Amino acid sequence: MTATPGAPAHAALPRRVHMVGIGGAGMSALARLYLEQGVAVSGSDQVQSPTLDDLARLGAHTYAGSAPERIGEAELVVYSSAVPESDAELQAARGSRIRTVKHAVALGELFNAKRGIAVAGTHGKTTTTSMLSLILERAGLQPSFHVGGEMLDLGTSARHGAGEWFVIEADEFDRRFLEYNPEIAVVNNVEPDHFEYYGTYEQMRGAFADFLRRIRPGGAAVVWGEDERLGGLIDEVRPPRVVRFGLSDSGRGWDVTGRDLRLDSGGSQLTVEAGGERTVLNLVVPGVHNARNALAALTAAGLVGVPLADAAATLSDFHGARRRLQLL
């Protein structure tokens, strides 16, 4: 059963964007999305890097250091959470009454204009988002995606696709994921983290609850059924629809269930059952955690309408994201 279409909120694209801290993974991915839509992009970072060189080859005007005079006619200035409020370029933009927003706000405006899938959780966000993006790409759906790392199979961290779906990694730090209104919200797990920002687990848990409340009417939450913390959160929030995935060697089944997991040094194999269908999933990325990440991706892909066997076949050729258990 597929998801129900939501009601995307369309926002006009700026003609020119300046990005402060453009060399970060999330910022550079956002820059790619702008460039692919014909937006003129300029940006600065503290030091010169291969990332700045790559963006320059794509058409962005990048430089190391700070040069407030180079903001020019930018209609929007986007800045990383790592950029201090005292930054000279940021101050110059505000002095010129140019709109300034954090990365998550700018990304949210692009994401919320499409049917969105946001992947959240303490662990597994980058890999699950990469898996799901690859599945939708190989299924011919031409998705847009924004991942917090380079996908080895597609050679990029972001792409603006012509299709109706947008897949993003939804980071809980700084409450960034509260800028997104997903049709499908994937939550892999909710574990204590980011105490430097939240202070307590209860505060972080409350942010995840608020994220789940942002699911569009008729949408769905895709959650790891084995996580008791997450189960309690779902009981509290009561999303419009809940679809659970999990491993089950004890005989218990979920909406999407992985059985007979076998691990080896090269990856894993398991049988996946969903809605009366069954297929064998072979992974070349190692670990139990990646088997769970794959189940999350398969579950969300099923809601989009990708057949289980097709999605599993794509994941058999998934090689991960750079710097995530990457074989060097």
Image (cartoon, grey):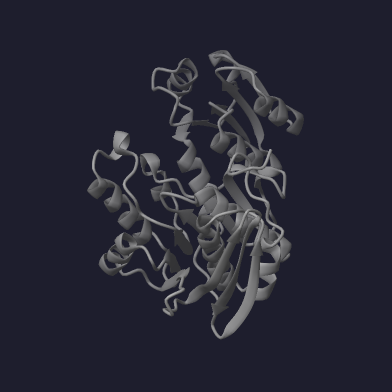
Residue drawn 54% across the image and 73% down it: 260
In percent of width and height, residue 95 lies at 43, 19
Name the residue rendered at 45%, 49% in the picture: 123
Q: Where is residue 324 in the image (x, y as percent from the top left)?
A: 58, 43
Number of disc labels: 0
Of the pair 280 and 200, the residue shown nearer to us: 280
Farthest residue, direction bottom: 276
Quick check: 12 left or right of 228?
right
Q: Where is residue 164 in the image (x, y as percent from the top left)?
A: 62, 62
Q: Quadrant of residue 278?
A: bottom right
Position of 78 relative to 251 (above/below): above
Quarter holding the C terminus is: top right
* Residue 83 or residue 173, whichever sits in front: 173
Residue sitting farthest toward the front: 264
Q: Which residue is drawn at 42% across and 76% down?
A: 250
In the image, taking residue 58 as reference, residue 286 lies left or right, namely: left
Q: In which quarter of the image is the N terminus?
A: bottom right
Residue nearest the viewer, comparing 300 with 167: 300
Residue at point 66%, 29% (across, down): 51
Mark yes or no: residue 4 visible: no
- Residue 231 makes an appearance in the image: yes
Q: Residue furthest right?
A: 57
Q: Quadrant of residue 252?
A: bottom left
165 on left or right of 92: right
Q: Viewer-proximal residue, 224 or 183?
A: 224
Question: Does 223 appear above or below 130?
Answer: below
